[in-house]
Amino acid sequence: MDDGILVVTFDGTQTIEKAATVKKTLASAIKSKKREIMINLTNLEKVDLSFLQLLYSASLEAGKSKKKMSINSDVSDSILDIISLTGFNRTIGKDSNHIFSTFKGNEE
């Protein structure tokens, strides 16, 4: 099994209109032979709640498959604001290692 890192890049606008494509891309990444999935959001301009929900759901599925999924730290302030406004930057339940936990404001 290849233990490397698979980088999945999302850029531009990722909203409900692209949800089916995002879901398919994330599912393929989880099915890959890579042990770690890095989500690159460097050139992401706009997201909505559906995109964040898909990322979170994919991170849970990755965990069930014993894979690590993370987001690069080079994310625009506007995307960080949306993550914060939707509450995804906070620890959800007892899982302090979820995909959004690396962003500031997750201390609750």
Image (cartoon, helix red, strand yellow):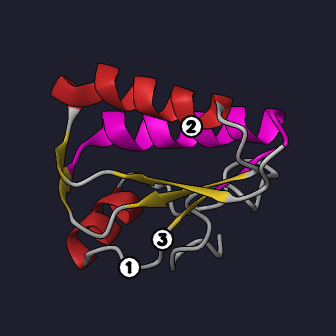
Give percent across and percent down for residue 27. 54, 27
Q: Is the Cβ of the residue at disc 2 closer than 8 Å to that at disc 3?
A: no
Amino acid at circle 3: Asn
Element under disc 3: loop
User: Reading the chain from its start, which is encountered first: label 2 or label 1?
Assistant: 2
Give percent across and percent down for residue 28. 54, 28
Check the image and report above or below for 43 versus 56: below
* 25 or 20, nearer to the observer: 25
Separation of marks 1 and 3 at Cα, in angstroms = 6 Å
* 88 or 11, nearer to the observer: 11
Q: Is the Cβ of the residue at disc 1 closer than 8 Å to that at disc 3?
A: yes
Element under disc 1: loop
Q: Quadrant of the N terminus?
A: top right
Instruction: State the residue at coordinates (77%, 46%).
Output: 67
Residue 74's label in the rendered image is 1
User: What secondary structure is the stretch in magenta mostly built from?
Assistant: helix
- Label 1: how many Cα within 10 Å (few below 14, some 14–19, many 20+): few
Residue 2's label in the rendered image is none
Q: Disc 2 marks which residue?
A: 29
Magenta span of residues: 47-69
* 33 or 47, nearer to the observer: 33
Amino acid at circle 2: Ala
Nearer to us: label 2 or label 1 = 2
Separation of marks 2 and 1 at Cα, in angstroms = 20 Å
Instruction: State the residue at coordinates (82%, 52%).
Output: 94
> Residue most toward the front?
2
Q: Quadrant of residue 43?
A: bottom left
- Label 3: how many Cα within 10 Å (few below 14, some 14–19, many 20+): few
Q: Disc 3 marks which residue?
A: 72
